[in-house]
Image (cartoon, grey):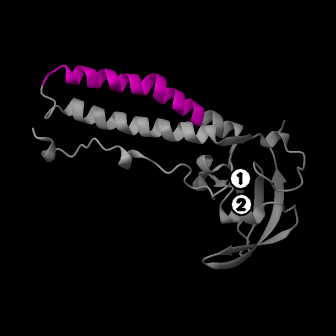
Amino acid sequence: MNKAFVKETDNDDEDELPETPGLPAGTKNYMTTTGYRALHDELMHLMNTERPDVVQTVSWAASNGDRSENGDYIYGKKRLREIDRRIRFLTRRLEAAEVVDPALQPNRDQVFFGATVQYCDSQGQETTVTIVGVDEAEPLAGRISWVSPVARALIKSREGDTITLRTPAGVQELDILQISYPDP
């Protein structure tokens, strides 16, 4: 089949990802040891397990002859591009990572990267969040990125402080109830 009728292209420009999405320009990619380990483990799994399996499938599918209507070959090539794109992304993120161990934080009475903070808003709703790296953030699980508006407002506050959080919805006052760090 003529390449004009196939959606695949030889151009990998669309596969490129921004170098550091989610990070303000000129900042480091702070990450906890747990987050670094998770990204590293994902990279190793992709490189040592998943990619070789897909390469083997694509090789087998290619040996069957006509590739234009071979679903295993077409899907395998697409999956291989996705894996390679993720490998490039993870490699860049890990190379730029600045690993911070929150357990080694000397100022445990103040909020810094890696702190778990319990705060109360003006309606009396208590919330607990842990400040983590951009790649580790899971807001629904209470893990917020250090570049998020809430984390930026919390940084350097102490227990008992009332901080001001400016959001598109308006200004809120938050009372810091408790600050904790993992044990060393």
In this picture, is 39 found above or below 154?
above
Residue in front for this viewpoint, 43 or 123: 43
Per the image, the residue denoted by label 1 is: 131
* Image quadrant assignment for residue 157: bottom right
Give the dominant element type of the magenta stretch: helix, strand or loop: helix
- x and y percent of residue 75 in the render? 26, 35
* Disc assigned to residue 44: none
- x and y percent of residue 59 in the render? 27, 21
Q: Using residue 181 as the reference point, say whether residue 51 is left or right of it.
A: left
Q: Is residue 58 magenta?
A: yes
The residue sitting at 13% across, 34% down in the picture is 69
- x and y percent of residue 182 in the render? 80, 41
Q: Using residue 7 as the reference point, say whether residue 51 is left or right of it.
A: right
Identified by mark 1, the residue type is: Ile
Q: CA distance from mark 2 to mark 1?
A: 6 Å
Task: Give the magenta range.
Answer: 39-65
* Image quadrant assignment for residue 166: bottom right
Per the image, the residue denoted by label 2 is: 151
2 and 1 marks in contact (CB < 8 Å): yes
Identified by mark 2, the residue type is: Ala
Circle 2 Cα neighbour tier, 10 Å, few/some/many (<14 / 14–19 / ≥20): many
Numbered circles on residues, count: 2
The residue sitting at 83% across, 60% down in the picture is 156
Task: Report the residue that reaches farthest toward the bottom.
Answer: 170
Q: Secondary structure at mark 1?
A: strand
In this picture, is 74 found above or below 152?
above
Q: Using residue 157 as the reference point, say whether residue 74 is left or right of it.
A: left
* Image quadrant assignment for residue 50: top left
